[in-house]
Amino acid sequence: MTLHTADDAGIAAAADHLHTGGLVAFPTETVYGLGADATQDDAVAKIFAVKGRPNFNPLIVHVGRPDWLAGLAEPDGRVDVLTRAFWPGPLTLVLPRRPDTPASKHVSAGLNTIAVRQPAHPIAAKLLAASKRPLAAPSANLSGHVSPTLADHVQADLGDKIDMILDGGPCQTGLESTVLDLTHDTARILRLGAIQPADIADLIGHVADGSSTANDDAPVSSPGQLAKHYAPSLPVRLNAASGEDKEAFLGFGKASASTLNLSPSGDLNEAAARLFASLRELDNPARFRGIAVAPIPKAGLGLAINDRLRRAAQGR
Ligand code: TXA
Ligand code: MG
């Protein structure tokens, strides 16, 4: 049985697996991560193997405290104010990699940069404290699938290939972290998430938006932004008024006749938290021919939701 309650015994067993080079899925506030000791080459390589992840797509390294960052990345004047404001939480910082860092070269996938975040979920925090190691952790789904927001999603994608899944119930935020590139003078958003660009700009000045420019043929400075991510197997049609001809209809607000509704009250936080689980549930070719999705407001958290929906619609 890979699925395990995240009590003290579960955390201790998970830390043992990590120390001996195993893979442990654990909840974060955004989505479930597939963790390995970031300092062990073989363990990190296994992440790529079980996910079927292309070896050019680097991994986020999760830390238990902001001061772990100093051993991983070169110092940067903007880090302090950002980590004080947003850590622990869904902001990933991309920084120049310290040449002498103990982190496996595989986490950077050939780049001279490293992505780091401190997750806020109490189970993630306990696991990091118990393992005392930075943890490399991509979303715990098969490469190209929708990210997991329930332990059952991880079980379905990877259950027979990993050592353990710590069950922490549903993830609160439901969308992957905001990724911010700090390797140039102008900071740049590589992936939209719950931390808003405007709130980052308030602290460090102008922030460029690189979240929609990357595509499959572009050089891989932000490899995870390949359009082919986050895709269900059924076709996804956006900004739909209703479902047509055997389409499931994913509603929002007071949409009529929806198969599922992301948030009947029109709350974007609730919609984000439910998005991936809803897409997984509706992705059922035995019942539906496609998934039609109601329009989601294109502001605030709605921008990140629309970003994931656009990828889901392009992904096949
Ligand atoms: O919320 C999250 O970020 C979740 C949880 C588990 O922390 N993790 C996650 O990991 O979404 P993953 O691997 O699914 O997405 C990481 C993203 C990818 O788009 C990847 O290309 C990008 O971060 N990334 C990682 N390292 C990078 C680097 N050195 N430079 C540029 N982009 C990087
Ligand atoms: Mg992912």
Image (spheres, grey):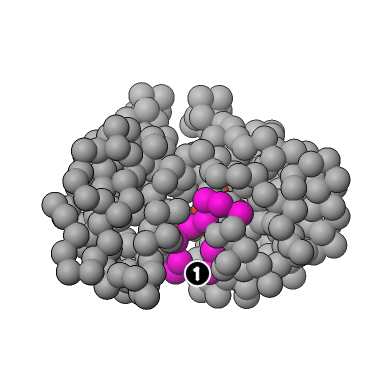
> Looking at the image, is 27 positioned above or below residue 163?
above
Identify residue for label 1. Answer: 143
What x and y, as percent, mark residue 189?
37, 45
38 horizontally vs 250: left or right: right
What x and y, as percent, mark residue 151?
61, 54
Give the prevailing secondary structure in the magenta stretch.
loop
Residue type for callout 1? Ser
What x and y, as percent, mark residue 231?
37, 66
Q: Is ligand 2 closer than 8 angstroms to the Cβ of mark 1?
A: yes
250 horizontally vs 58: left or right: left
Q: Is mark 1 on a helix, strand or loop?
A: loop
Of residue 97 and residue 126, the one placed in the foreground of this image is: 126
272 in magenta: no
Decide if residue 39 is in sight here.
no
Of residue 129 and residue 4, the one placed in the foreground of this image is: 4
Q: In which quarter of the image is residue 225?
A: bottom left
Which residues, given as a range, are shown in magenta? 140-151
